[in-house]
Amino acid sequence: MKLPPTASYGGRSGRTNVAVNRKGDTIIVHASCDSLQRQCEYYEKSSSVWRERYEGMADLYEAELKQRSNPIKTFFTGLVAGIAITILGMIIIKNKLKNGN
């Protein structure tokens, strides 16, 4: 992919011909031999599987980032809840001691 955008390659060995062109992010291969065509199909399928896996992992990563909570927000929420529970507990204890229960 580090080749120039209009890079191409052509080769011939006996009756076998191959021409490879690059258009943008796509590599185009024209082969006159069945074994070369099968090899290209294999790499195409392999590439598509890896692309699907990458996209799936990228989506999973984004979902994980969204699902994580902010640790500072969690700390302050817990701090406020602890202070509120302490104050309510003190009020209840004072009322019980005041009433003589």
Image (tube, rainbow, N blue to C red):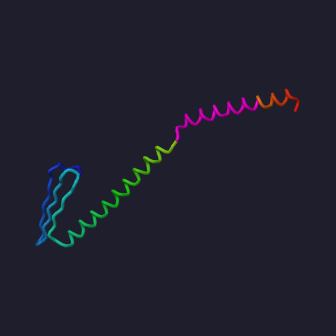
State which region is magenta. Answer: 69-90
7 in the magenta segment: no
| Numbered label tally | 0
Residue 28 occupies quadrant: bottom left
Residue 95 lies, in percent from the top left, at 81, 28
The rendered magenta stretch, by its main secondary structure, is classed as: helix
Quadrant including the C terminus: top right
75 in magenta: yes
- The residue most toward the front is 99
Task: Describe residue 91's horizontal placement relative to residue 69 as left or right.
Answer: right
Residue sticking out furthest to the right: 100
Please report the residue visible at 16 percent of the width from the left and 71 percent of the height from the top: 33
Vertical placement of 63 versus 9: above or below?
above
Quarter of the rendering containing residue 45: bottom left
**Image: 3 above or below 89:** below
Using the rendered view, name the quadrant where residue 12 is placed. Answer: bottom left
Viewer-side residue, 97 vs 41: 97
Q: Position of residue 67 (x, y in %)?
A: 49, 45
- Give the residue drawn at x 17%, y 49%: 5
In the displayed structure, does residue 86 sit left or right of residue 23? right
Residue 16: percent from left, percent from top: 13, 70
**Residue at 18% of width from left, 54% of height from top?**
22
Lateral position of residue 20 relative to residue 67, left or right: left
Q: Position of residue 39 (x, y in %)?
A: 24, 68
